[in-house]
Amino acid sequence: MNTWRRAGIAVAAILSSVAVAPAANAEGTMQISGLGLPGPGDCDAAADGVAPPDYILVMTGDLEGCLYGYVDLDTIQARPSGTYLDRGTEVFVSDADPIDRFWTTYTFTAKFTDDGQQSGRCQHPIVGGEGAFAGATGRLDFKDNILEGVAVDFSYRGHVAIR
């Protein structure tokens, strides 16, 4: 099968697992964006076959499903200046049937003051997947949307590529 046809099939498979079909290029890469909302919402780690997470985001927009996060406690750095950093891993489980999923690593940084959280962002390189996301690479970038010192939701954008 030629490379262009494989890329087209991979893109079609991915588009079937996202709510809104983002534009894909000939190489099988698509730009994505949306909003993560604090879970659990309809997310159920046990039903999705994942370990109990440290946090859950209900993903809306181009990715529809649940993002389960696992903080590596050995990486937490909270400084007296208010800067904060942690790292960990995640699994995104789509709402598609059959379920498609991908895995990320992440690095989260934030700034806190006496008034609460002032900023926050994280980068999530995609490190693998299955189903429509088999062979996935790419990256999601999240920005914390803060109201009165509390992160209320999380805007994301990025790209997913299928080889």
Image (cartoon, rainbow, N blue to C red):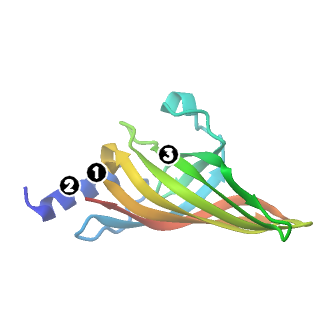
Q: Name the spot of residue 1 as percent of width and height, x first.
A: 7, 55
Residue 13's disc is 1
Report the residue marked by disc 3.
91
Seen as rendered, the residue at the extreme top is: 46
Foreground mark, 3 or 1? 3
CA–CA distance in space, label 3 to label 2: 23 Å
Q: Nearer the viewer, residue 125 or 130?
A: 125
Crowd rating for badge 1 (residues with CA inside 10 Å; few <14, some 14–19, many 20+): some
For residue 139, say whether it is visible. yes
Crowd rating for badge 2 (residues with CA inside 10 Å; few <14, some 14–19, many 20+): some
Seen as rendered, the residue at the extreme right is: 114
Crowd rating for badge 3 (residues with CA inside 10 Å; few <14, some 14–19, many 20+): many
Look at the numbered disc 3 and give the secondary structure of its residue: strand
| Amino acid on which the number 2 mark rests in the picture | Ile
For residue 32, say whether it is visible. no
CA–CA distance in space, label 2 to label 1: 6 Å
Sequence-first disc among 3 and 1: 1
Q: Is residue 5 left or right of residue 65?
A: left
Q: Name the spot of residue 9 as percent of width and height, x first.
A: 20, 55
Look at the numbered disc 2 and give the secondary structure of its residue: helix
Report the residue marked by disc 2.
9
Residues under numbered marks 2 and 1 in contact, where contact means CB atoms less than 8 Å apart: yes
Sequence-first disc among 3 and 2: 2
